[in-house]
Amino acid sequence: MCEAGRLGRVVLVMAGTLALGAGSAWADIVPESRESTATLTVANLGPFPGYLGGYSGDVFTETGLASGDDLFVASSLFYGPDGFNRVNAGDFSAMQTVACGDEEVDIDFSQSASGSGNANPFINMINRCTYYFSVDADTSATVRVTFDGDIASGDDFVGAELLRVEGGDDPATLETLFALQNSGAVSGSGEVEATVELLAGERYEIFMRGDAEQGPSSGLISSAVRLTLTLACPADLASPTGVLDFFDVLEYLARFDAEDPSADLAAPDGTFDFFDVLEYLSLFDAECE
């Protein structure tokens, strides 16, 4: 297309940006429910000083937490001295911090276990969270996961998944949109990012897991994993992400001028005209809110 036509569209866009009032909104996250558990399994350790005998069980279990509640549990464990003058000691912790907004869900996990002594102490701190949600309009989203492990001679495991699922309790998985599994016998950390497509009318599940398993003489075992799901802003086309400015307008104009399908925003499909520009202006004016 000629340069004059392109400049004309720039004028239209800038004028429209100044003139428009409240525009159309983008997709929102609709929280459904959250279930969280923190479970401890131990051997040769107990809940009070001087404890003798075997102990295994759940020290903390809570389900059906409100979508924005946090979970934290931490305590110490004991054993002995027994008839052979053996003594064990242990500590454990589990944390879940959840932040829920219209356009973002952030779930931060950490767990740890440590034990010492001469009577084979064993601790496994098991941290789990299941978060169900939907979106009220079709949208793309960014999933960003960071993870970190500090492993001596024990074992840790972290995982994070985003699934499309059926309705009801314990739903079947229809599609795996994102999955992270990190386990092994060496220390490690990393970050993974992916773009996914979310559809209105579908149900989604974020499943987070973290284990800190401490064996005899393995010292402190800790792990952490954090998942952030951020819905895309349809008007945010240029860097930096999360900032709407003139460069986003210029990027849209470039796509419009090239008749890129991503610039075809209004009916009729396949036609690039003033109504596509107005639709982009409406998205821009909404400021991704």
Image (tube, rainbow, N blue to C red):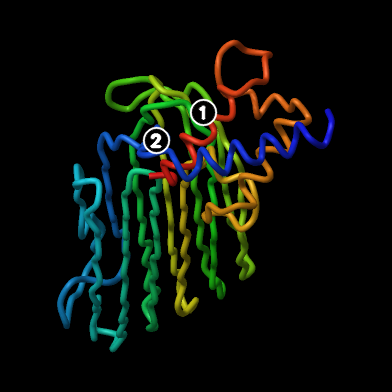
In this rendering, is residue 166 above or below 24? above
Report if the CB atoms under discs 2 and 1 are less than 8 Å apart.
no
Q: Amino acid at mark 1?
A: Glu
Which residue is located at x 72 percent, y 34 percent?
255
- Quadrant of image for the N terminus: top right
Residue lying farthest bottom?
A: 85
Q: Residue 117: x and y, percent?
A: 37, 83
The crowding category of the residue bearing disc 1, from other C-alpha atoms within 10 Å (few below 14, some 14 to 19, many at least 20), is some
Which residue is located at x 44 percent, y 69 percent?
214
Residue lying farthest top?
A: 268
Residue lying farthest right?
A: 2
Tell me the element at label 2.
loop
Depth check, front residue: 115 or 184: 184
Q: Residue 102: x and y, percent?
A: 33, 43
Where does label 2 land, which residue?
A: 23
Tell me the element at label 1.
helix
In this rendering, is residue 177 above or below 187? above
Which residue is located at x 32 percent, y 59 percent?
96
Q: Amino acid at mark 2?
A: Gly
- Quadrant of image for the C terminus: top left
Nearest to N terminus: mark 2 or mark 1 = 2
The answer to which quarter of the image holds residue 108 is bottom left
In this rendering, is residue 278 above or below 157? above
The crowding category of the residue bearing disc 2, from other C-alpha atoms within 10 Å (few below 14, some 14 to 19, many at least 20), is some
Q: Residue 207: x and y, percent?
A: 41, 42
The answer to which quarter of the image holds residue 109 is bottom left
Q: Residue 112: x and y, percent?
A: 39, 70
Q: Which mark is residue 279?
A: 1
Is 88 left or right of 145, judged from the image as shown? Answer: left
Which residue is located at x 67 percent, y 20 percent?
272
Depth check, front residue: 113 or 181: 181
